[in-house]
Image (cartoon, grey):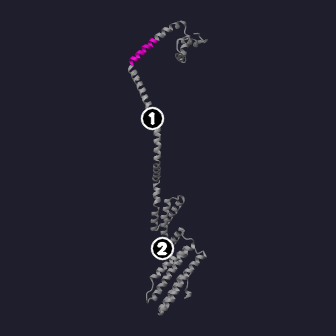
Amino acid sequence: MSIPDLDGNEALLHLLGESWDAKQYKSIESSKWTRDYLTRLTSLPLDELLREPAELRVEQEKLRMDAQQLAFNDYPAFIHANTCRHLVDSTLDELQGHLGEFLDSVPALKSACEAFEKGTADIMDERNKITRVLEHQNVLVDLLEIPQLMETCVWNGYYSEAMDLASHVRLLCVRYPLEIVQSIQKQVQTSVDLMLVQLVSHLRRPIKLAAAMNVIGHLRRMDVFTSEVELRMMFLRCRHDHLTQRLERIKRGEGEAFEYTKRYIDVMREQMFEIATQYMSVFSQQEQQSILILSDYMIRLLRDIQALLEAQLPKISDTSSLASILTQLQYCGMSLGRVGLDFRYLL
């Protein structure tokens, strides 16, 4: 074989590798140690170069002896390493088989997971709903207890708190038009109707001015009357019902015209003064219509007194009794004069 036109280490390596196969030649050629050794070899003088083969043989023999000694000393480790290698090979083979089985079962597993997911979708929806309910349990309990709380407030006379609850429920109905909220609103409305009945009934019983002002304030806030005039008419109607009840209790018997007339005048004086005072304190007197409503009502009551006198005085023959009634009427007119209802000029 002809030697290519190469220089230096390349030519020497090519010359030495003529007897090597291609794989061995490529491995040695690519080794950095080969390059370094060839560089060292070409730099040696002739005598050292002649001794190099002998030194290499000595080094080779030394390495062989070291290898034998190492094999003798560490043969258990070599045997164990070989055993481990066989075990690893066997394990890898088994693992490959199991992996193949697993890959074959993956499609079936995927199908089963998809079927399970579809089957549990409804359950998950229910669970999510229950979870949300539990998270907002306190709020829901407070919401569901509003009708009971509203009823308790109404029965115990806490009307301001009851109206606050009613306003809150109306706002909830606007924001959340749900069936449960509408059901709560209906129950609350029942309590509101009961509260209206109670407030109106207070005006049909003996009531102080402060309490009457509170009742009218609550009725205004409930906004159940179409106008202020309707509210004033309702007030006078309720107070008139109370007056009628008082008069019914003193209804005379046979032969008691004098006593009945005296008690009738006393009740009318007391109640007319109270009604007029409460009306003028509760409602504004700056509107002409407000004054006319009260005036018309008081004129009606004065006509009732006139009708009673026309019916009862002819039945009283005693002069002192008639004088006593006249004095009582004078006192009644003077008392009502403090609220602008002096009728003494009519006597």
Instruction: In the rendered view, tell whether residue 258 sits above or below residue 109.
Output: below
Q: How many marks?
A: 2
Q: Main secondary structure of the magenta part?
A: helix
Quadrant holding the N terminus: top right
Local crowd size for mark 1, using a 10 Å CA cut-off: few (<14), some (14–19), many (≥20): few
Point out residue 211 in the picture as x, y percentages from the top left corner: 49, 72
- The quadrant in which residue 42 appears is top right
Is the C terminus in the top left, top right, bottom left or bottom right quadrant?
bottom right
Q: Which residues are magenta?
A: 60-74
Asked whether residue 137 is in view, the answer is yes
Amino acid, disc 2: Ser
In-front residue for pair 141/5: 5
Residue tagged by mark 1?
A: 102
Q: Are marks 1 and 2 in contact (CB under 8 Å)?
A: no
User: Left or right of 289: which side holds 96?
Assistant: left
Q: Is residue 65 magenta?
A: yes
Query: Which mark lies nearer to you, 1 or 2?
Result: 1
Q: Decide whether residue 70 is among the magenta residues.
A: yes
Element type where label 1 sits in the image: helix
Residue 129 point in image, percent of width and height: 47, 52
> Residue at (43%, 32%) from the top-left corner?
98
Q: Which mark is residue 201?
A: 2
Q: Is residue 63 above or below residue 323?
A: above
